[in-house]
Image (cartoon, rainbow, N blue to C red):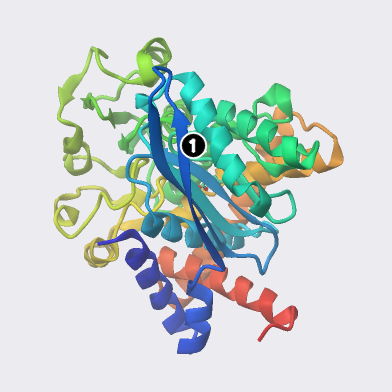
Amino acid sequence: MRAFEATRRFFHTAAEHLDLNAQAREAMLMASREVRVQVSIERDDGSLATFVGFRVQHDNSRGPMKGGLRYHPEVNLDETRSLASLMTWKTAVVNLPYGGAKGGIGVDPRSLSQREMERLTRVFVDQIHDIVGPDTDIPAPDMGTDHRVMAWFRNQWEKYHGFNPAVITGKPVEEYGAKGREEATGRGVGTLTVKLTKRLGMKPEATSIAIQGFGNVGSHAAKFLSEAQFPVIAISDITGTYYRKEGLDIAAALHHKLQHPYGLLEGFTECEVLPTDALLTLPNVDILIPAALGGVITEKNAKQISAKAIIEAANGPVDPDADRILHDHGVTILPDILANAGGVTVSYFEWVQNRQHYRWTLDRVRQELDRTLSEAFEHVWQNAHERDLSLRTAAYMIGITRVRRASELAGLT
Ligand code: GLU
C-alpha cells in the first residue's frame, strides 16, 4: 500500500467518529503546498549527478509548519506527502504550536562523500530557501540526515536571509542546537514504552523487547530501555538481526556502532545472527519496536507477530490492513504520531531557546520532554478507553480536533 493511502485511511477512521463531512475531510487531507525541485551537484570526480528533492507543507492552522528532511533512495512525493500530514497530527497530539511539513531528497547518502552531501544540501537550500523560515516552515533531521546537514542548511539559508538559527532544528549543540535533541526521539520512545507497559501490567524484567533499526532512534530507545531493566533480545539493521534470548549487551552494541563504518552492527558477536527480516516475526517478543522504514508490517506478516504491543518509533510502519489484523488479535499499538513525537518536541524546545537566546540544561530538556509526552499519553489513553477506541484512532481524533478548532478560531470555515 502506498504511504499516503495508509495515512488517509487512518485519518478517515478517526474522521468517521468525529462526523466530519466530505468537504472538511478533503480540505484537511490535501497539502497546502507541494514543491518538487531538481538538485544537481558536481561529484568529487567532476561528473554531474542529478537528484529530485521535495518539500511538502501540509497545514499551518496551529503555527509554522515543522518536519524533517529525509535523504533516502525511496523518497518520493507520495511518501513525503504522507509524512507531512503525519507531522500535522503529531504536533497537534503533543500540543506544540506548529503545523506539519516534510521534505527530502531521493538519494542514498552512503553513496556520497561528505563534501558531496554538503553540496547537495546547499543546492537544495538554493531551491527552497524562500519557502522555509522560522515563522513559516522549520526543517529538522530525519532518516539519512543529521546535525551536520542541519548546520550546512542553516549556513546556506542565512546567506539569503541573515542570521536566524531558528530556521532549522537538530543543529550541532555548539552551534545553537539543543542539548538532548539527538537522543530525544529514542528517549521519548523509551519513556512511552515504560508508560504503556505499566498500563498493561507488564514488569520490565519480564518484558522482552525487539527493535527493528539501530539508527539514531532505535539505538537511543535500546539504551533507555536496557537501562530501565527491559531485556532487549533483538536488534537489527541492514546487515542482519542480532538475537540473544536472555537479552543483548546493549552497551556493547552501542560501542560497536560507534567503531564501525556508517554505525552498522556487522561483526557484532556474542549473539545469534539471523537475516534482517527475521526480527519482526521472532517468537517470544513482548514488545516490538519498528524503528526503521515505513510500511514494514502488512497483512502478509501481521499474523506472525508474537508481540503483545507495538511501539511505532518509525513513521507509518504498520499499514491499515495489518493494523486491523493486529487489533483483532488484541495487540496494542502505540501510534507513530505519539510514539515518536519526542524528536519534534525537543525541536520545539530548540526553536524556543534560539528565539530567546537562552540555553536550557539537559535536565530541563529531559524534564519538559517527559512532561509533554506524559500529558499527551494520558490524554490519548483516556480518550481511547472512554470510547473503546484504538490508541491510534484516539490520537488522530485529538489531532484532527485541535487542527479543526484552530482553523475555526481563525475564521476560515
Ligand atoms: N523527523 C522527525 C519526525 O518525523 C522530527 C521532526 C522535527 O523535529 O521537526 O518527527
Whether residue 397 sits left or right of residue 409 in the image: it is left
Q: Which residue lies furthest to the top in this view?
A: 259
* x, y percent for residue 104: 47, 45
Q: Does residue 15 appear in the picture of this structure?
A: yes
* Quarter in which the N terminus is drawn: bottom left
* x, y percent for residue 35: 52, 57
Residue, x 57% and y 68% (percent of image)? Answer: 32
Q: Nearer the viewer, residue 112 or 22?
A: 112
Residue, x 30% and y 56% (percent of image)? Answer: 318
- Residues packed near mark 1 inside 10 Å, few (<14), some (14 to 19) or many (20 plus): many
Residue labelled with disc 1: 186
Residue, x 66% and y 69% (percent of image)? Answer: 61
Whether residue 327 sits left or right of residue 92 in the image: it is left
Above or below, comparing residue 307 to residue 162 in the picture: below
* x, y percent for residue 276: 20, 32
Q: Does residue 253 appear in the picture of this structure?
A: no
Query: Which element carries disc 1, helix, strand or loop?
Result: helix
Whether residue 81 sits left or right of residue 369 in the image: it is left
Q: Does the residue labelled 1 lie within 8 Å of ligand 1?
A: no
* x, y percent for residue 111: 35, 25
User: Mark 1: which amino acid?
Assistant: Gly
Residue, x 49% and y 72% (percent of image)? Answer: 30
Residue 271 found in image quarter: top left
